[in-house]
Each structure stands twice: as C-alpha cells, then as structure tokens.
C-alpha cells in the first residue's frame, strides 16, 4: 500500500500543477508533495519488505537506499524551486513542475520494481519526463542538448530492452519456466547458458551505462547538464543517472550468481576505469562549471562500476557512495544555479568571486566540491576510502593505483575551475544581475551538506544496518 501511495501521490501532484493556472502558486505544490513523499518513504523504509503482485513489486534494502536518496534530493530541489522559479518568470513553469513530479513517481516505481520489464518501463519514463526540463531555457543550445539527450538515452535504453529479451530467451534455452522476476532469475543464474547471459549483460551494461553516463556513452551529459537549469541538473545527476545505476545493479545481482563471474567483473572494472580516465582528461582546463559537474558525474559513475567489479568489501562502499554522491551532486548543482543567476554566466572567466557577491553560495559550492572529491569529514570520503581499501586488500593493486592517479588528476582539474569561481574578484566590466541570496535558495543545499557532514562522522545504526543489508544483497546467491 505504501508503494502505491508513494507512486501515485507525485502523479496526483503532477495533475494539480498542470491544472493550477497561477505560475506563482504552482511551484508551491512541489514542497507539499516532497514532504508527504519523504514522510511515507521513512515509513516504507522502516517496514520489512514483502513481495507484492506475484513478486513484481518488492522494496528490498537496495531499493530502500535508492528511495531514501531520491526522496531526500527531491525534497531539497522542491523547496529550492519555489524561489528559483520566481527568478525565471519569463518561462512558463507548468512543464518543469509537472515533469519533476512525474519523474519522482517513475523513480519511486523503479526502486520497488523486481520485474525487469517493469523496471525498464520506469527508467524509460524518467528519461521522457526529464526531456522538457532540459529544454527549459528555450534556446538553440538547449534544444540541441535535449535532442542529444533523447537520442542517445533512447538508443541506450533500447539496447537494455534487447538485453532483457536475451535474458528471457536464456531461460527458454535452459529449459526453465520463462520469468523476468529478479529473485527467480537469481535462482536460475547457475543454469543459464553463459553465451546468452553474457550477451544480455553486455547489452544492459551499455544500455544502462548510457543512462548512467559511463564513457564512451556519456556524450549527452556535458550538453544536457550544461544547458539545463541547475535545479534540473541536480535531478539528472542524483536521480536519473542513479536510476541507470539501479538497473545495472539488478542485472549484476543476477550475473554474479552465475557459474562464471570473471567476465562481468572484468567488463565493469574496464569500463569504470575508462570512464574515470575520460572524465579526468576533460576536467583539466574546463571553464564551464556545469560541464565540469557533468564530467564529475561521469567520473563517479565510473567509480560505481569499478567498485561493482571489485565486489567484496567494495559493495558496502557502493551503497554509501550512492547516498554521498547523490546528495553532494545536489548541493553542487543547486549552488551552480545560484552562481549562474548571480553572474548571468557559468563560465569561470565571468563567474568569479562568488564569495564576495554571494557568500553563502560560494561557501556551499566550495564545501560541496571538497565533499565530492573525497575530503573528510564528508560521507564520500568514507565511501571512497572503502573503495581503495577493498582494491588493495583484495589484490587489485593496479586497479587501485590507477583509480588513485586518475582521481588526483580529476581533483586538480576541478580545482583550477573552482578556485577562481569562488575566490576570484567579481568582474568589474559586467553589470550586476538582480539575483540576491534568499533563504530558500540557500537552505536546501545547506541542509544536504549538513547531512553529508553528519553521515561522514556518524552513521545512525538503522541506516548502517540498511547499508550492510543492501551490500549483502549484491553478493552471490548460490
């Protein structure tokens, strides 16, 4: 019942936002729905999970962690949107309000979907619902970014569907009762023919990897993140990309239970390291702060892939990093939106000296940058420490060393952009915009950053148990 409510309440809110005629009042629906969703998510996470609809729906520990991250991030974005959209009165906000709520409903469904077809449908819905939001600025660059986003992500998700069909056919070849239920497929995995299972994994790795933004399927990210409002970028990085990660985790759970796991782990480590390398290269001398954040997202999706390939202790880090990465990206994109409004530019040549023009935004952007790059005491430091510990303790010396080297390059590249944006002098030859910091533009990213700091120092026992249980679900089922 709670999953039904969590899915339908955002849809009801989307209908209300579509019908409300006032552009001033319409954004107020977002925080109302967000509070209800966050409250009900807490109840759903606290309850033991039980399969529904013959196993199609089941909110397991992995789904609960994704639901928690999605709901918390959406709540911050919802409150932020109230003031942000007042600065964008020249744009009709009906589409962005409705699209956000439809996306929240689809992400919620994805967390509880244990039928791979239903999961695919939910993930595809998030893609479609976010497309009009990428086009919010209504200019040539945003429409180009939207078409690139739609084209590449649609091809990717189509390949994921083909992978699901291959997986279903594998059950037929093995003489088993055809099924796309996660738990059933985990039990089938040792009996499935490797050739069909490998093909299904490869297709879904490319398909869901496109959604995540793994290189070389990442090419939609810099344009979409760069041209979308910061508010939309937060949901793309912390919501949409993580839906792709969830899809990859589900097929990983099946394949890791098969008779031969070397192929899957090698593919994940290889594509993960390649993604981090590509991101590190493009982060050097990057002048656009939103495109910088896009490549940072590519980097961290690569970290997820490497950690899944490592397995063992790294799986605990995956679950920690899911929360840390999602919330930190929320802070970075929301504050980057403030910087864009304050300077009418997202280029470091013109958007500089944020601490002097918008002190709260500058301080939050700097702190979130440190958090995202694995600095203590924030949660990403703890999760990345687990990644490196797992790599070296499990004998993956080369993988761990390459990760360390590439992350160092990425850190230095981001520093070259962040330092002048935060500490430089505001340009004197550009007229100051009408942007001023307000409570609702600063409080949501501040709240996310405080949560990141607290969780980096102390993980509440219920959350710790949930993380451990979720990591355990990624272990092989024999």
Image (tube, grey):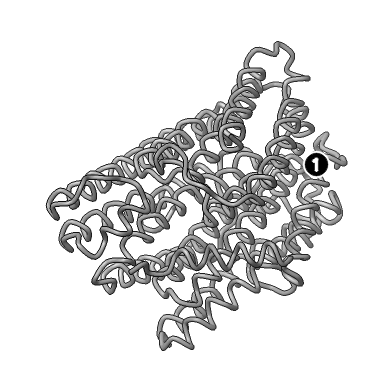
Q: Nearer the viewer, residue 236 or 469?
A: 469
Q: Is residue 395 left or right of residue 77?
A: left
Q: Position of residue 144 (x, y in %)?
A: 45, 34
Q: Quadrant of residue 418?
A: bottom right
Q: Position of residue 81 (x, y in %)?
A: 73, 34
Dot 1: within a 10 Å radius of its alpha carbon, few (fewer than 14), some, or many (20 or more) residues?
A: many
Q: Which residue is label 1 attached to?
A: 441
Position of the C terminus by quadrant? bottom left
Residue 464's place in the image compared with 40, above or below, is below
Q: Is residue 68 left or right of residue 27?
A: left
Residue plotted at (50% across, 77% down):
313
Q: Nearer the viewer, residue 423 or 310?
A: 310
**Label 1: element kind:** helix
Q: Position of residue 457 (x, y in %)?
A: 76, 72
Q: Quadrant of residue 7?
A: top right
Q: Is residue 183 left or right of residue 60?
A: left
Position of the N terminus by quadrant? top right
């Amino acid at each position: 019942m709670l999953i039904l409510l969590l899915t339908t309440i955002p849809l009801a809110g989307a209908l209300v936002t579509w019908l409300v005629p006032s552009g001033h009042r319409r954004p107020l629906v977002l925080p109302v729905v967000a509070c209800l969703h966050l409250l009900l998510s807490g109840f759903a996470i606290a309850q033991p999970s039980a399969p529904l609809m013959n196993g199609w729906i089941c909110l397991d520990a992995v789904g609960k962690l994704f639901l928690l991250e999605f709901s918390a991030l959406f709540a911050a974005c919802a409150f932020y949107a109230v003031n942000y959209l007042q600065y964008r009165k020249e744009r009709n906000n009906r589409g962005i309000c409705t699209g956000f709520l439809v996306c929240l409903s689809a992400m919620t469904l994805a967390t509880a979907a244990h039928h791979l077809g239903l999961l695919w449908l939910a993930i595809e819905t998030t893609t479609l619902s976010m497309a009009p939001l990428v086009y919010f600025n209504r200019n040539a660059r945003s429409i180009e970014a939207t078409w690139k986003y739609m084209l590449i992500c649609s091809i990717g998700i189509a390949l994921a569907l083909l992978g699901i069909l291959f997986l279903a056919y594998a059950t037929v070849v093995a003489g088993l009762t055809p099924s796309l239920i996660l738990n059933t497929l985990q039990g089938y995995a040792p009996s499935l023919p490797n050739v069909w299972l490998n093909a299904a994994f490869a297709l879904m790795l490319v398909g869901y990897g496109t959604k995540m933004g793994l290189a070389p399927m990442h090419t939609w990210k810099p344009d979409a993140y760069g041209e979308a409002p910061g508010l939309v970028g937060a949901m793309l990085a912390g919501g949409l990309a993580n839906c792709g990660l969830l899809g990859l985790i589900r097929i990983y759970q099946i394949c890791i239970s098969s008779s031969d796991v070397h192929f899957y782990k090698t593919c994940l480590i290889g594509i993960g390291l390649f993604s981090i390398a590509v991101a590190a290269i493009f982060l050097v001398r990057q002048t656009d702060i939103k495109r910088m954040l896009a490549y940072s997202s590519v980097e961290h999706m690569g970290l997820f892939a490497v950690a899944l390939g490592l397995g063992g202790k790294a799986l605990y880090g995956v679950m920690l990093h899911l929360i840390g990465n999602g919330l930190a990206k929320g802070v970075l994109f929301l504050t980057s939106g403030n910087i864009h409004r304050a300077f009418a530019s997202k280029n470091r040549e013109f958007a500089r000296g944020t601490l002097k023009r918008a002190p709260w935004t500058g301080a939050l952007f700097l702190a979130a940058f440190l958090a995202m790059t694995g600095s203590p005491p924030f949660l990403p430091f703890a999760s990345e420490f687990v990644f490196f510990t797992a790599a070296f303790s499990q004998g993956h010396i080369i993988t761990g060393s390459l990760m360390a080297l590439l992350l160092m390059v990425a850190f230095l590249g981001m520093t070259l952009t962040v330092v002048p944006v935060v500490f430089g002098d505001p340009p004197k030859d550009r007229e100051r915009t009408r942007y001023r910091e307000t409570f609702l533009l600063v409080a949501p990213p501040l709240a996310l950053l405080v949560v990141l700091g607290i969780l980096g120092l102390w993980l509440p026992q219920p959350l710790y148990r949930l993380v451990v249980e979720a990591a355990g679900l990624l272990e092989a089922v024999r």
